[in-house]
Every structure is written in C-alpha cells, then in structure tokens.
Amino acid sequence: MTDRLPTGMGAPVRLEHVTKRFGQVVAVNDVTLEIPGQKMVTLLGPSGCGKTTTLRIIAGLETISSGRIFIGDREVTHQPASQRPITMVFQSYALFPHLNVFENVAYGLRNMGLPQGEIRTAVSEALALVGLAGLEGRLPSQLSGGQQQRVALARALVMRPQVLLLDEPLSNLDAKLRKQVRQELRALQQRLGITGIYVTHDQSEALAVSDLIVVMRDGVVQQVGTPEELYTRPANAFVARFIGDANLVEAEVRGGQVWVKGYRVPDPPGPKADGRRLLMIRPEAISIRPADGETAKDASGEPGQADTGLPGRVVHGFYQGMSAEYLVDTDAGQLMVIDAHLDGPVLPPGTPVRLAFAPRGMYLLPEGETAAPAAAAS
C-alpha cells in the first residue's frame, strides 16, 4: 500500500451547541459532541431521533441553524461539503449504474484532475484493500449486495478522507452477510486509522463496530460511552431499553439494600440513596427454575437454594437451541428471562418458577427515573 490510501490520519470532530430546524421541527437540539480521532463512533437511536441529520451536518449536506463545527483544528461550519476532508458511504451505495467498478471508484479522483497513472494506482490499491481486485470491469448490476457495498467503501477510501461517514451502510444486506461485512469494515477502519462516524438503528451492529456510541432521542444526546458502559450503566430508562433487552422494575432502596416486591436483590451497582428507584435487569442476568424444585442453578450455572428468588409464573417459553427465552409474570411485572444454561425441556406456560438475579447484569438508574414500563422492552 502506498501513501495514497489513508493510514493513521483520522481527525477528531467537534460539534458545539449545534441546532438544526426544519421549519417548526427541531431535528437536532443544541448538540455538543466530541468525536475522537481514529475511532469508530456510532450515532444510535430510533427513526426521527436526529442521527442522520447530525451526520449530514458533519458532511456539509445540511446547513445548521446555530452552532459551530470543527474537523481537527479547522472550523468548517460554513464550508461546503466539497471543501471538507470527509467522504460518505450512503445507505443506497449511490453507485453509477452505467460505470464499471473501476470508473465508479475513480470518479472523485477524475474530478480532481489527477493524472491517469496516479488514478490507476490509487484505484487498484483501494479495490485490493476491500477485496475486489480483479472485478474492475464489472458493472454494479453484475455484483452482489456485499460487493456493491465494498465498491462504495473503496470509492470513499480512495479520496484519503480524514473522516469517513457511514449512513446505515449495511441495511440492504441479509443478516449473515451484514455480520461478515461489519467485521471487515471494523477491521479496515482500525487498520487505516480513519475517524469513522456510523449511523444505525441496529443495537447489535452498534455494539459490534463502535469504540463509542452516541445515543440520541428527539434530537438530543442521551448518553455517550463505550458499548460496555452503555450496556451496564445506562444513564436513563430510554438508554437501558434501547441498548439490548432490559427489564425495568420498581425497587426500593433502604439502608443500602435493594428490594423488589419483598425479594432482596443481591447488591446491584448504581447510586443507592434511599427511596423508590428503577432497577434495570438484563434478561441474561436472571436465572429461572421451577418453584417446587429442591435445587436449581443460579445465574452462573452453579447449584442454588430452592426457597429463594422472586416468585413468578411462565407466560411463554421459546426454545433457542442451547438456551431458552421466557416471559414470566411476577408481582414486579412481566420479565424477560434468558436461560443460557438450558439442560432440559423448555418450561411450559403456567409453570410456577423462582427467579434469581446476578449483580453483574443489574443497575440502579439515577434518581428521577421512576416510571417503569408494564413489560420488558427492547
């Protein structure tokens, strides 16, 4: 690889009090955000949360109503997209159907007026980098979805961007191919040292590719953190529900002890000021056993006591091969449970059960988060 392709040149991106209005609609609301260089940062949230608008603002495809934007030490607030050191991979790939693979990748370089020899070298390097060497003469219609995605990525990388923007780039791929390509994309970003800003609504995709995740809702940043931080210590109920599956139950904290409907929860992390609070419990942190059994496994798979745990009754049970998923009715509401140590048949509906909780999969949400949903949500 020559120095035509980006190596370790990713620049940080900074948004200062950025707001974007479309008429009376505030799509991005006073967002201040630091995106470190050479990291993959994902903007995550439901449809309409402002994540794609934020990406387009960074790209220069949307003008902001107020605020400032920096790439590296350079303010780009009023600079057009063509003058920003960024490239973008769109959800639709936006390939030219009448141009072959080589010409699609070379398009931006030709517009820059580079010599033919330099273009040929750069395009060949980019295609080799994404595993498409030898396919230069094919049209987009002759490629699979995964190959088209790689062409779009090569076209972006050949421009030597400091920042690579990706707008739901894998949404058109099937589940198996999506997992494969996201692994390749993550490895490529780390190898080249590009700053990547990735938009998705897919939680598992965000967890897999990100150094940092920015969770957005209604144009406002809810929390910024590593995948582990957001999964284990969410800032609020919205983040808890949006990052993975979460049970949110009302708990009472008394003298540092946490109680759920008369059952003492074993020391969950989180602030423990006395009062009523919301307790997040991940489904995989709950062990389940028939209530009339003598012994049962706890969340670590070890034998536990038969007379402890929150009582409940199975509503539904779903076989998942080596595991089972349950919906269990309890005094604390309906809880989602994942039995990762399934060693027998799935418990049928109506079975009385006891549920025990593992501290590692729980978190007490900050004060003020008091309204629990009626059932588990994802």
Image (cartoon, rainbow, N blue to C red):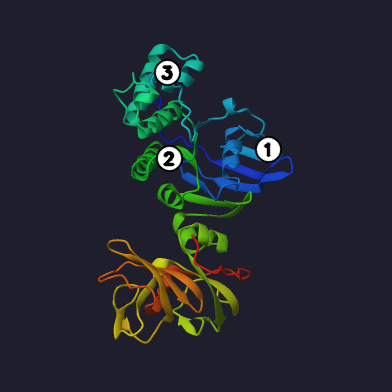
Whichever of labels 2 and 1 marks the residue nearer the N terminus, that label is 1
Report the amino acid beneath label 1: Ile
The picture places residue 276, in percent across and down from the top left corner, at: 60, 77
Q: Secondary structure at mark 3?
A: loop
On screen, residue 291 above or below 372? below
Task: Assess whether mark 1 and mark 2 are in contact (beta carbons under 8 angstroms).
Answer: no
Q: Which mark is residue 99?
A: 3
Which numbered dot is residue 316? none
Asked if residue 10 can be seen in this view, the reply is yes
Badge 3 density bin: few <14, some 14–19, many ≥20, Cα 10 Å: some
- Residue type at mark 2 is Leu
Query: Tag on residue 64?
Result: 1
Q: Position of residue 256 (x, y in %)?
A: 53, 81
Question: How many angstroms separate mark 1 from mark 3 (CA)?
Answer: 34 Å
In the image: residue 165, left or right of residue 63: left
With respect to residue 119, does 236 lie above or below? below
Q: Which residue is depicted at the point 48% across and 28% down?
A: 94
